[in-house]
Amino acid sequence: DNINKVIAYEPVPMAYKLAKNFIEQSPFHSKIILRNMAIGADRETKIISASRMIDFGFDYTHVKDVSGVNVKAITLNDALSDLDNVVIKCDSEGSEATIFNDTDLSMVNAIELEYHGNLEQVLIGLKGKGFRIKIKDPLKKQGILYAIRK
C-alpha cells in the first residue's frame, strides 16, 4: 500500500454525491479527500447549468444558460501546492489545455489525461516540462494522453 492519499475534484453536484457515497463505502475512505470544486484556468466561481447538473459529461466552459449551481474553481497550481510525488488523472471535458498552461508540474511524476479536440493546445501546456508523452490513437479527436516524467 504505497498510496498516501488521493485528492479528487468533482464540480458536478450529482456526481460529487455519488462519488462521496462510493468513497464512504471504500476500504480506502480514510485516504481519499473529495472536494466539490472545479480545476480551471482561474480562481473564480463557475455556474453549473441547471439543465446539465446530472450530465456526467458536463463542460462548464461552454454553458449557455446562467441558472444553476455556483461551484468554486481553483487553478491546478493551487491544487498542487504543498504536494510532492504526484500522479494526475484528468478528464476536464475540454478545458485541459487551459488547466495545464502556466502550471508548475515539477512535483508531478505522471499524468493520464483525456483530451477533447484540443490535443495541440494540451501538448503546448506540457511542452518543456520534463515529460515523455505517449498518445493513444493520436489521430482521433478525443483520446488519452500519457505523460511520464523523463
Image: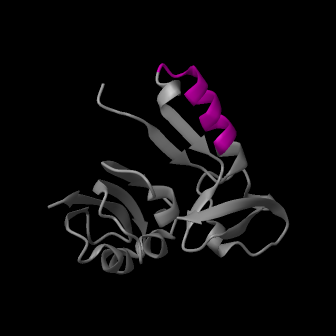
80 or 117: which is nearer to us? 80
Residue 21 position, x and y percent, is 64, 29
Q: Is residue 53 left or right of residue 138?
A: right
Which residue occupies 33% across, 69% down? 140
51 or 82: which is nearer to us? 82
Q: Quadrant of residue 106?
A: bottom left
The secondary structure making up most of the magenta span is helix
Q: Residue furthest left?
A: 150
Q: Quadrant of the N terminus?
A: top left
Which residue occupies 52% across, 26% down? 29
Please say if 17 is above or below 65.
above
Here the colouring is: one colour
Q: Quadrant of residue 50?
A: bottom right
Which residue occupies 68% across, 70% down? 44
82 or 17: which is nearer to us? 82
Residue 72 position, x and y percent, is 69, 61
Quick check: is 119 in the magenta stretch? Answer: no
The residues colored magenta run 16-27
Residue 74 position, x and y percent, is 59, 64
Q: Residue furthest right?
A: 67
